[in-house]
Amino acid sequence: MTPLERALRERIAAEGPITLEAYMEACNAYYYATRDPLGAKGDFVTAPEVSQMFGEMVGAALADCWTRAGKPGDVIYVELGPGRGTLASDALRVLRAAGFEGEVHLVETSPALRGMQEKALSPAHWHEEIADLPAKPPLLIANEFLDALPIRQLVGEVERRVLVAAGGLAFDRDGEIVEASPSRDEAVAAIAICLAAKGGAALFIDYGHAKSAPGDTLQAVRGHAFAPVLANPGEQDLTSHVDFEAVAASARDAGVAVTPLVSQGEWLERLGIRARADALAKANPDKTREIQVALRRLTAPSQMGDLFKVIAIHSAEWPQPAGFE
Ligand code: SAH
């Protein structure tokens, strides 16, 4: 039994069944705090870890938006859940080359990952929560951050809970599921309120769907394979698909402009990832194959290209980031 499972069983014995939302929050807090989950030896690989081209395209989109906004001087780079800091270091290389000199602010709860980010990125400022960010216009990126925030699952009108049954953890009910994520809605609203008041733009990249619909999208991943969601609590990555209709609605309610939702493949192609791949291959002929494989992995519909989606939200006074039309 994992250490977290023991603690959860004690909690359930004392309090009764806990909501899936509380379960997911406890599992992910423990999981991220205790390891680097990324890479071949970890549990999953994210787009910035596939190739530097991903972070460079994010940097190019943010640099272009900032340039068209007139290069305001008080803008900061913000990343939510920066993992190993790879995306930020690739994006900031492009932003710095465009003349961006703003501070770097990272929202990260995991001490293990903060340590890696410090090596990749200092000087930077770290924050526990979005609410702790300075009140300045951000150029913000969140890749595979929203998927890790806790969700609720409703069966009919009733919220699904986790209990102990037959010696293991189990759900208290089954049936047609409707998901909601108040934490996700709050995170997007907090960013949107800041954008509406201060200016700036934010990119959210994640797996998910364009329209809210019933269905169970909770998943656990361990060692690059799916696992049962209630197995090994705290030792596997628990996520759900992002409901981008809900993301767009929270942002609009806070008074910001929202772009169309586009697939990651389409977005990267429009930003010129193919030209970047060609330039990289030309400069590193021995890496040509590796670069082509990475390009396909990021953009091909059968790989990450279609499942992953990109949406941007921005202050009405700022231009729409590139790649969405
Ligand atoms: N964006 C990175 C890492 C994705 S993994 C990449 O693309 O490689 C999810 C990241 O979000 C990790 O850095 C994790 O520690 C962080 N995270 C998860 N839940 C969080 C929370 N509630 N608050 C802040 N960071 C969180």
Image (tube, rainbow, N blue to C red):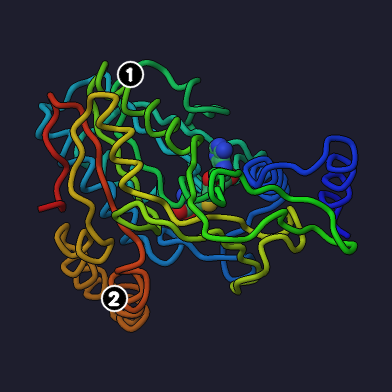
Side of 245 relative to 113 (left or right): left
Q: Is residue 6 above or below residue 134?
A: below
State the image quarter where residue 79 is shown.
top left
Q: Is residue 258 above or below residue 186?
A: below
Q: Where residue 300 is drawn, which disc sits there?
A: 2
Between circles 2 and 1, the one closer to the viewer is: 2
Q: Are marks 2 and 1 in contact (CB under 8 Å)?
A: no
Residue 254 placed where, x, y %? 29, 24
Q: Secondary structure at mark 2?
A: loop
State the image quarter where residue 214 is shown.
bottom left
Residue placed under numbered mark 1 in the picture: 136
Which residue: 10% across, 26% down?
A: 70
Side of 208 relative to 147 (left or right): left
State whether label 2 is within 8 Å of ligand 1.
Answer: no
Amino acid type for the residue under numbered disc 2: Ala
Q: Nearer the viewer, residue 76 or 151?
A: 151
Which residue: 28% across, 61% down?
A: 264
Closer to the chain start, of discs 2 and 1, is 1
